[in-house]
Amino acid sequence: MDAEGLGWLLVPLHQLVSWGAAGAMVFGGAVPYIPQYRDIRRTQNAEGFSTYVCLVLLVANILRILFWFGRRFEAPLLWQSVVMILAMLLMLKLCTEVRVASELNVQRRVFAAADNKDEARAPPRRSYLDLEPRHFWRWSRFGDYVQCVLAFSGVAGCVTYLSLDSALFVESLGFLAVLTEAMLGVPQLCRNHRHRSTEGMSIKMVLMWTSGDTFKTAYFLLNGAPLQFSVCGLLQVLVDLAILGQAYVFTRHPLKPAPHAAHPASAKAL
């Protein structure tokens, strides 16, 4: 009788834990960006955050959604991709607004030309697609990022639709999706290394990355997700730990500012 009573209690408890884990999977990936979003909005400075993180996550989650059509996986992972895409678009919108506000005299960069009433006053555009490496993903309008995402989704969607019968293509697509997501922290890692500093980067965001990726990897292993998910989840945790290591090293050993040499003309005048 006691065992039956305990079983009656454990069943709904197990269901509640399952719902909680699924909810954490759906929204947990976007939560780490809340501190970074608030920091950028408060300081009106987006230099410490690499927008290529948004590019990596947008590509990874679009590919994961396409992978779902070829090989169905758990619904929370699918909805997580939808939430992450929306979150990254919000981050891009804020970063674009902040950057453009601080670059009032810089020539506007666009992804696709469009007719509008202000065309006469707008800077001259060289071509329909402004895809020079130094301009890519540095556009001056949020709408250009949306157009790029839609163009990529359309092309990738067509290729996937035509190749769904190929098991090799579907498995490769899944591996590419999670491998791209595993490279999430690499743009931030490279930016920190290039500047020898983590100033402007939210440590809270990276700590949430690490805890979230650890939870996500454990979720993959315990729920029998495709092998690609588990392997790339482990790789993602290692990248997060590397960024935390950078934060520790660069804080303990900050880069010394270069001394300002006297101007030759000023020295002569003295």
Image (cartoon, rainbow, N blue to C red):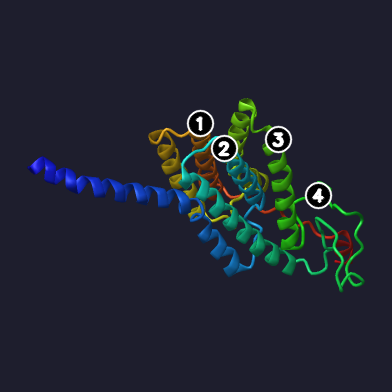
- The quadrant of the picture occupied by the C terminus is bottom right
User: Which sits earlier in the primary sequence, circle 2 or circle 1?
Assistant: 2
Instruction: Write down the residue under mark 4.
Output: 134
Assess whether mark 1 and mark 2 are in contact (beta carbons under 8 angstroms).
Answer: yes
Assess whether mark 2 and mark 4 are in contact (beta carbons under 8 angstroms).
Answer: no
In the rendered structure, find residue 231 and report the number of the disc placed on it. Answer: 1
Mark 3 surroundings within 10 Å by alpha-carbon count, few (fewer than 14), some (14 through 19), many (20 or more): few
Residues 184 and 58: in front is 58
Q: Report, in whole angstroms, how far the alpha carbon at label 2 lies from the one at label 1.
A: 9 Å
- The quadrant of the picture occupied by the N terminus is top left
Q: Can residue 87 be seen in this view?
A: yes
Residues 257 and 138: in front is 138
Place residue 122 in its image quadrant.
Answer: bottom right
Instruction: Write down the residue under mark 2.
Output: 178
Q: Can residue 102 be seen in this view?
A: no
Query: Mark 2 belongs to which amino acid?
Result: Val
Residues 30 and 134: in front is 30
Q: Report, in whole angstroms, how far the alpha carbon at label 1 lies from the one at label 3.
A: 28 Å
Mark 1 surroundings within 10 Å by alpha-carbon count, few (fewer than 14), some (14 through 19), many (20 or more): some
